[in-house]
Image (cartoon, grey):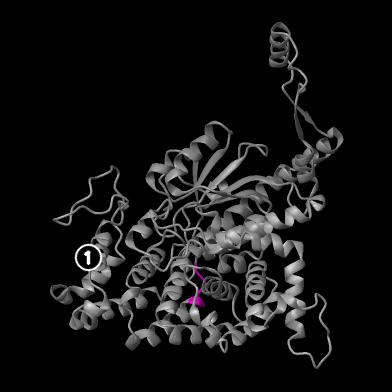
């Protein structure tokens, strides 16, 4: 460890470093005495080297104090600095797959693995940095590691982290992501046997239970379903610890003002007897089982990865939302929309009966032959309802929410990676009734910046995901299999000015391919383009924002379609 101190800045960079993508698989290098873990992703070799080295260091009690103070603690603060919400970062930079996203998620992963080296001397500063990060709008994959880090350190330093947690969760105006993370942490510290915190459970520490319960109760009325569901689980668990022998009390306790805790008793009994709450509680253990205090490098490498080789853990928010949907469907199946009722009315039945045991072999053979050539499974479908539903779906396919016929225009923004531009394109495409918008990642729809700039357009326009590496094959399929005319917005030797472009016909569907913000359309994609167009420019700058360029083209195509009328 001592020999690594002069290289600590290099170690920080290696912990977040991502290798260039390789076209063919290469053998993993060795550490000299042993190989890297077999699960090591090809784009994480350098940092796994460093993580292996750090994992083999002894615990704090046996570690050289100089290594702790001059190597490990500076590493922790440098990683927190890389992971924190910086003034130079923007929502566009933390979009999945970008350099900023990779740096943040890898920094938090390293911090989780270094959590055993957080001592009382630095616990306050680390805790403060964690709480600031909860307030940042970022992806659930990153938040998973921030939450895990806080849970581990809460168990290691309860006096610091538990009290700071109570102060934070008592704030009334937390963002949805902030309160969601705090609810996940509370769920683990109260409900997860692997992470349960003694100070929220022991008799001697009940002084902390009431403040926690008092902070959770208002969130029972949250408009956010996830927060409300976790608050219900936690309140059901905590009320009996605050109110002694509550299960022995009358189901309908007195509401007299002089009776202490009558509100808690009424709330508890409602949560206990409500059928939907009972269904939700039956699934609660699955929500938190993936959080483990003994998180190791092996655990990290076992997490599934996304297309960019970054860890893609399943977040509690997704699990609870699925449980809420299932709970609602169990309780309100009869209130399902028409298409769902049609699906459920499609009844599958098996021909034959159970009284065939006495039939002769020949009769059984004949029956088997008959059934194999006739109907084995019969679907009973209410045809009138089905036809109405199909007509409705057909109408929705060719008209937008306002009832206007959609233009046969597919706006392809797979090469655009900045969220503000994607939000603006979604808004413009919806306003002019484009057929669809193609984006590199459909999860951009949940980004707060995208929501703000698109003003809900993603709810009304069809959005399709096509990643850049699949774009050429997608364009060729559109061109040769579906008859689309591919138009690329790019300045080339054969580009036609936008206002002079001639559309084949009103019925010909068009793909408008937009280029990258700086580089434009890659050369290999131009082979799939039928016609390149450019926007005439008369100023000095000679460059338009990709959203503005796209909007100008969409409007020009709209005018030409109108001219056919």
52 left or right of 141 in image: left
Q: Which residues are magenta?
A: 134-138
> Label 1 belongs to which residue?
53
Q: Percent from the top left, x then y, of residue 380?
A: 80, 31
Q: Looking at the picture, tell me which residue is in the foreground, 260 or 385.
A: 260
Work out whether 521 lies above or below 382. Answer: below
* Residue 253 location, quadrant: bottom right
- Residue 104 part of the magenta segment: no
Residue at 21 percent across and 52 percent down: it is 35
Q: Quadrant of the N terminus?
A: bottom left
147 left or right of 50 in image: right
Residue at 22 percent across and 65 percent down: it is 53
Q: Quadrant of the C terminus?
A: top right
- Is residue 170 in view from this perspective? no
- Residue 136 part of the magenta segment: yes
Q: Percent from the top left, x then y, of residue 76?
A: 31, 77
- Is residue 200 in view from this perspective? yes
Q: Looking at the picture, tell me which residue is in the foreground, 284 or 385.
A: 284
Instruction: Name the residue furthest right.
Output: 384
Residue at 44 percent across and 71 percent down: it is 146
Q: Percent from the top left, x then y, of residue 411?
A: 57, 50
Work out whether 141 lies above or below 513. Answer: below
Work out whether 225 lies above or below 435. Answer: below
365 left or right of 314 in image: right
Q: Residues within 10 Å of mark 1 (few under 14, many from 20)?
A: few
Q: Percent from the top left, x then y, of residue 287?
A: 56, 62
Instruction: Name the residue furthest top.
Output: 362
């Amino acid at each position: 460890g001592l020999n690594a101190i002069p290289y600590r800045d290099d170690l920080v960079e290696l912990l977040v470093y991502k290798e260039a993508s390789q076209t063919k698989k290469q053998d993993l290098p060795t550490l000299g005495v042993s190989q890297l873990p077999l699960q090591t992703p090809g784009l994480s070799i350098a940092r796994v080297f460093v993580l292996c080295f750090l994992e083999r260091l002894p615990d704090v009690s046996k570690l050289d104090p100089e290594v702790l103070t001059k190597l490990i603690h500076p590493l922790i603060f440098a990683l927190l600095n890389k992971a924190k919400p910086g003034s130079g970062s923007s929502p566009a930079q933390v979009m999945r797959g970008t350099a900023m996203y990779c740096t943040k998620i890898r920094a938090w992963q390293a911090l989780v693995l270094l959590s055993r080296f957080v001592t009382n001397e630095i616990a306050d500063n680390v805790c403060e940095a964690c709480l600031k990060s909860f307030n940042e709008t970022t992806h659930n994959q990153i938040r998973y590691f921030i939450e895990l880090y806080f849970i581990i350190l809460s168990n290691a330093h309860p006096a610091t982290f538990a009290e700071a947690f109570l102060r934070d969760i008592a704030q009334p105006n937390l963002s949805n992501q902030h309160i969601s993370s705090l609810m996940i942490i509370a769920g683990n510290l109260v409900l997860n046997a692997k992470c349960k915190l003694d100070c929220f459970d022991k008799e001697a520490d009940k002084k902390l239970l009431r403040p926690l319960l008092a902070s959770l109760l208002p969130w029972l009325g949250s408009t956010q379903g996830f927060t409300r569901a976790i608050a219900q689980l936690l309140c059901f668990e905590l009320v009996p610890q605050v109110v002694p022998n509550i299960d022995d009390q009358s189901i309908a306790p007195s509401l007299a003002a002089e009776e202490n805790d009558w509100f808690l008793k009424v709330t508890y009994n409602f949560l206990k007897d409500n059928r939907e709450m009972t269904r939700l509680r039956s699934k609660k253990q699955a929500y938190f089982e993936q959080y483990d205090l003994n998180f190791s490098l092996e655990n990290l490498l076992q997490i599934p990865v996304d297309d960019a080789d970054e860890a893609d853990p399943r977040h509690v928010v997704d699990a609870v939302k699925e449980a809420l949907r299932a709970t609602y469907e169990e309780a309100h199946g009869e209130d399902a929309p028409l298409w769902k009722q049609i699906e459920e009315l499609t009844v599958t039945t098996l021909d034959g009966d159970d009284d065939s045991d006495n039939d002769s072999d020949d009769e059984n053979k004949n029956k088997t032959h008959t059934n194999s050539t006739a109907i084995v499974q019969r679907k009973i479908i209410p045809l009138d309802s089905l036809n109405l539903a199909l007509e409705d779906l057909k109408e929705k396919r060719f008209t937008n929410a306002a009832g206007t016929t959609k233009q046969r225009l597919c706006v392809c923004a797979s090469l655009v990676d900045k969220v503000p531009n994607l939000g603006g394109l979604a808004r413009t495409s919806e306003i002019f009734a484009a057929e669809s918008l193609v984006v590199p990642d459909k999860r951009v729809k949940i980004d707060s910046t995208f929501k703000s700039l698109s003003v809900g357009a993603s709810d009304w326009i069809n959005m399709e995901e096509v990643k850049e590496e699949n774009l050429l094959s997608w364009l060729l399929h559109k061109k040769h299999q579906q008859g689309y005319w591919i138009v690329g917005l790019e300045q080339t030797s054969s580009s036609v000015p936008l206002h002079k472009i001639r559309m084949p016909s009103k019925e010909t569907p068009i793909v408008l391919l937009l280029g990258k913000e700086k580089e434009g359309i890659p050369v290999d994609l131009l082979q799939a383009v039928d016609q390149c167009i450019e926007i005439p420019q008369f100023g000095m700058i000679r460059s338009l924002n990709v959203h503005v360029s796209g909007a100008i083209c969409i409007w020009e195509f709209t005018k030409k379609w109108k001219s056919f009328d």
